[in-house]
Image (spheres, rainbow, N blue to C red):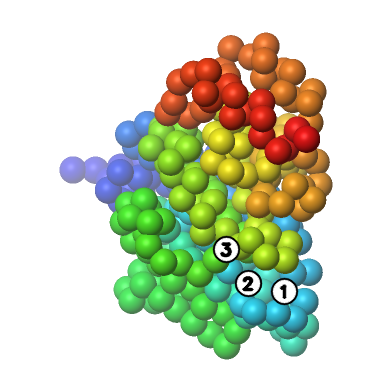
Amino acid sequence: MSEPSHPRDGDFELVTLRNGHRAVRHLGHGEVMHPAVGPWQEALRLYVDQPGLADRLKQPGPPLVIHDVGLGAATNAVAALTRARELGPDRARDLHVVSFEVDLAPLRLALADAEGFPFLQPFRDACEGLMKHGTWSEPGIHWELKLGDAVPFLESELPPADLVFFDPFSPASNPDMWTEGVLARVRRHCREDGEGALLMTYSAATPTRVTLLLAGFYVGAGVSTGTKGETTVASTRFESLAAPLGTRWLERWERSSSRAPHGGTLTPEVERRLRTHPQWR
């Protein structure tokens, strides 16, 4: 029997994008991880540089905690680890990354393709240690894995997050992860003191922003990435948003054909909660 044209592991395969970048695709629903500009560029722009991770790590304080929801091929997590390691003696606080993932096949595939995913190679031992032991550390950096369905972990004790990388498959492919119930659990584990916490996600869809608002976040526009003109940033504090949604967005929502939250229906109570959200006050 001939080998498949793309390396495969379980429900996933490696593919080459039109721009030449290697990426991981799900064989079932066909969705590609980080399809727009390639995984590394998107991870740095959207999840690491947008919230100013390097500057945050230069400020003395307790360990900076990231909840990495959707480890995938570990691109976002390794981008954060890379920034932390690059700072060297300028890093004034530790970094603690908590990754959530149900299937390690994407990471195994990416690690096996050193040419296609070169940014993982400096952290090969870290990735292998994470998969084998569920944890990995070096001085000033700690990485742990929550393997399995994320919801039970989100119902247990977790270190409060300063940043959330919310990067599961899309609502169409993975609807259970985008509901108000799940995002409210994510919100409960966010830091409340100081600057609060920021959540970054690639989706700028109206239902995504509606669901984040209903889950208790303040919501704003995020940086563009590749073909996406906008992404989304959510926060526990309105003041932490660089580009908060305003009443013009609310007016567009009123006219939208996609007004309901993910996994929910547009009831009078949902409409009331959205219109009276403190975001608009």
Marks 3 and 1, how far apart at CA: 14 Å
Whole-percent x, y for residue 266 in the image = 50, 19
Point out the tag, 1 or 2, that comes first from the N-terminus: 1
Tell me the element at label 1: helix
Give me the residue at 67% from left, 15% from top: 254
Type of residue at label 3? Ala
Residue located at (35% from left, 45% from top): 12
Q: Which mark is residue 64?
A: 2
Residue 161: image tag:
3
- What is the x, y in percent for residue 134? 36, 72
Q: Amino acid at mark 1?
A: Leu
Residue 87 occupies which quadrant of the picture?
A: bottom right
Question: Does dot 3 land on a helix, a strand or a loop?
Answer: loop
Quadrant location of the N terminus? top left
The residue to which callout 1 is attached is 57
Q: Which is nearer the N-term, disc 3 or disc 1?
A: 1
